Amino acid sequence: MEKTKLLLGTANRGKVAELNEMLGGLGVELVPLDAVGPFEDVAETGETFAENARLKASAYARQSGMPTLADDSGFEVEALGWRPGVLSARYGGDAAKTFSEKIELLLSEMEQSKTRSRAARFKCAVALAAADGEIVAESEGVVSGSVSDSPSGNGGFGYDPIFVPEGFSKTFAEMSSAEKGGLSHRGRAILQIIPYLRTFLGTLT
């Protein structure tokens, strides 16, 4: 019997790999955006991660005719007034196109900040949309920690090389995918939405 398909509202390979590991036991076929596109870009105009997750899940579901799981997440640093937040992927604009450049800019801005705090957190909001675009479930996850003095580790993606979660002495980028998955903001949000996913997807089979 053909598996139910669930569209993942991202083409980010790092996110796709994480989601495949977290959702592999659901018994559904997880489909990344670039496997069935092209899609019209979705403008992330929300002021919160939850708003952007809803925008993406609903728009990609309507375009594809498939139930869609989308997330929006970002990095927040106390010394920067909890920036970059929803602008994490666009932080630094054209002057910082790669995450290595964004990290370098962020560390530089922290050095110039009057606040000596190195507190930081990752936040993630997840939204599940039915094939018609209606949002049927949502969840959020947060993990707190601190910004390291310099990047360390080759795993993960984004700001992982400079984030040390509370209770640990190594960055997300130095952890295995399984270790990070149990701690991460995305992992926590996904764990909360899995029961809703099972129920919703069960109605489609």
Image (cartoon, rainbow, N blue to C red):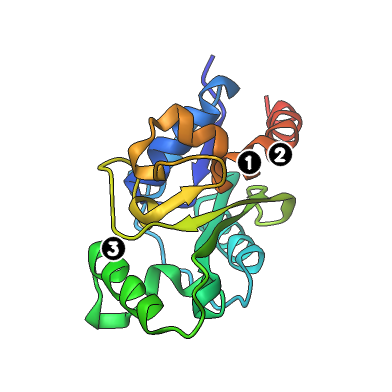
Mark 1 touches mark 2? (CB < 8 Å): yes
* Distance from Cα at disc 1 to Cα at disc 3: 23 Å
Q: Which mark is residue 136?
A: none
Q: Is residue 97 left or right of residue 109?
A: left
- Given residues 180 and 136, the one toward you in this image is 180
Residue shown at the point (59%, 60%) measured from the top left: 53
Q: Is residue 125 above or below residue 20?
A: below
Q: Is residue 102 above or below residue 140?
A: below
The residue under label 3 is 99
- Given residues 183 and 132, the one toward you in this image is 183
Nearest to the eye among marks 2 and 3: give it. 3
Coordinates of residue 164 in the picture (x, y in percent): 45, 49
Coordinates of residue 196 in the picture (x, y in percent): 75, 36
Neighbor class of circle 3 (other Cα within 10 Å; few <14, some 14-19, many 20+) is: some
The residue under label 2 is 192
The residue under label 1 is 188
* Distance from Cα at disc 2 to Cα at disc 3: 28 Å
Residue shown at the point (29%, 59%) measured from the top left: 150
**Residue type highlighted by circle 2:** Gln
Q: Is residue 84 above or below residue 158?
A: below
* Distance from Cα at disc 1 to Cα at disc 2: 6 Å
Looking at the rendered structure, the secondary structure element under dot 1 is helix
Coordinates of residue 171 in the picture (x, y in percent): 39, 45
Residue shown at the point (71%, 56%) measured from the top left: 134
- Given residues 71 and 118, the one toward you in this image is 118
